[in-house]
């Protein structure tokens, strides 16, 4: 499977940014028709994205499309354009609950035009409204087309009337820590990847690196970028070192050779079933 460490948002009505996308090194490009596009420009972005999808040389970074939310009059046309153009996936903003994922998956069925390597999937920005956050406990395994969950501090803050989302030292206020943690838990329950939220202060790359390292340590599989400079940080942080990969391979191989042994000592360290599961997960995700 292709790696999905870095998901770069590209405003869908910007010719310059669309042109720049493929050279940024992002693992996935998210062609946006939602929050980076004004209401007046939605049709322009939709048409530009459709054309971009049809003319883009495929085989590079997968091309996903962020449609407008199901509370808007635009989402069906957005989804239809994405599917007709051969998008690799749809990013669903502000889902109110998993029912919105079902609705989008249903809309996608039978509309798979263009070329794509595998059936189009969904990344749901599940924790970016208060209602979405409160519905995270409803996510279950086997949701149709679901590939990943994410959240968003900007929209969540706007929704609740926040004046700030972080403390002066850069740490997240409690609501956002909760959203970050519960999105990870919900993704785990649903059996899909958790993708870290946008970090809006895009010139602060040191702060972004710390935020991303914490995401990796928490269990996130990748993260979102809004600027090309953030992509290198995501790719770097979400790429395990050769030593980490070698250790994981060693653990898997040792258990495979030992048959039914549940616990053993490797390099003087106790290694048992959770370590084996973690090694397998690391290799599946990043190798
Ligand atoms: N995707 C692709 N290219 C991008 C980009 C993006 N998200 N952000 C910037 N670039 C390009 C710029 O066009 C510029 O290239 P160019 O000289 O060939 O035109 C280059 O990268 C450097 O950009 P820079 O001048 O540093 O940034 P900016 O001031 O032009 O733009 C933002 C700053 C925040 C407006 C811009 O990064 C952006 O639009 N980000 C995406 C916002 C978004 O999608 N929001 C919704 C998701 S929450
Ligand atoms: Mg948004």
Image (tube, rainbow, N blue to C red):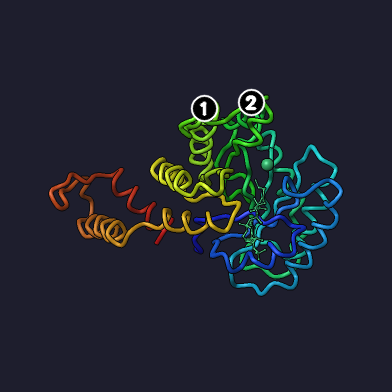
First-in-chain label (1 vs 2): 2
Instruction: Choose top left, top right, bottom left or bottom right for residue 13.
Output: bottom right
Q: Residue 181, percent across and down? A: 48, 33
Instruction: Please report the residue visible at 79 percent of the width from the left and 37 percent of the height from the top.
Output: 71
Quick check: 36 above or below 3?
A: above
Q: Is residue 16 visible?
A: yes
The residue shown at (69%, 38%) is: 94
Residue 9: horizontal and vertical position, in percent? Answer: 64, 54
Question: Which disc number belongs to residue 240?
Answer: none
- Circle 1 crowding by C-alpha within 10 Å: few under 14, some 14–19, many from 20: few
Task: Name the residue carrying label 2.
Answer: 162
Q: Secondary structure at mark 2?
A: loop
Quarter occupied by the C terminus? bottom left
Camera-nearest residue between 227 and 253: 227
Q: How many marks?
A: 2
Q: Is residue 270 left or right of residue 40?
A: left
Q: Secondary structure at mark 1?
A: loop
Mark 1 to mark 2: distance in Å?
10 Å
Q: Is residue 29 left or right of residue 107?
A: left
Q: Where is residue 31 shown, x and y percent of the image?
A: 69, 57
Left or right: where does residue 73 sit relative to residue 82? right
* CB under 8 Å between discs 1 and 2: yes
Instruction: Assign ligand 1 to one image quadrant.
Output: bottom right
Whether disc 2's CB lies below 8 Å from ligand 2 is answered no
Residue at image coords 63%, 26% = 163
Is residue 192 among what the camera can see?
A: no
Per the rendering, the mark at residue 173 is 1
């Amino acid at each position: 499977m292709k790696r999905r460490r870095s998901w770069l948002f590209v405003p869908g009505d910007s010719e310059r940014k669309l042109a720049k996308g493929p050279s940024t090194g992002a693992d996935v490009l998210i062609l946006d028709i939602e929050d980076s596009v004004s209401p007046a420009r939605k049709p322009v972005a939709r048409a530009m994205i459709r054309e971009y999808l049809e003319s883009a040389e495929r085989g590079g970074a997968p091309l996903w499309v962020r449609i407008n939310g199901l509370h808007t009059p635009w989402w069906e046309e957005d989804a239809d354009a994405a599917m007709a153009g051969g998008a690799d996936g749809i990013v669903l903003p502000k889902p109110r609950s998993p029912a919105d994922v079902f609705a989008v998956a249903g809309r996608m069925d039978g509309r798979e035009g263009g070329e794509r390597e595998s059936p189009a999937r969904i990344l749901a920005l599940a924790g970016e409204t208060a209602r979405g956050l409160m519905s995270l406990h409803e996510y279950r395994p086997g949701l149709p087309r679901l590939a990943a969950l994410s959240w968003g501090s900007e929209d969540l803050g706007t929704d609740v009337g926040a004046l700030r989302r972080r403390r002066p030292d850069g740490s997240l206020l409690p609501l956002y820590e909760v959203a970050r943690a519960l999105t990870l838990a919900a993704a785990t329950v649903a059996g899909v990847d958790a993708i870290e939220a946008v970090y809006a202060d895009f010139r602060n790359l040191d702060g972004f690196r710390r935020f991303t390292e914490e995401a990796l340590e928490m269990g996130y599989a990748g993260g979102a970028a809004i600027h090309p400079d953030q992509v290198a940080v995501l790719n770097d942080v979400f790429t395990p070192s050769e030593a980490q990969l070698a250790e994981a391979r060693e653990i898997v191989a040792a258990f495979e050779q030992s048959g039914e042994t549940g616990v053993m000592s490797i390099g003087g360290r106790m290694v048992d079933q959770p370590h084996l599961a973690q090694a397998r997960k690391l290799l599946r995700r990043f190798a």
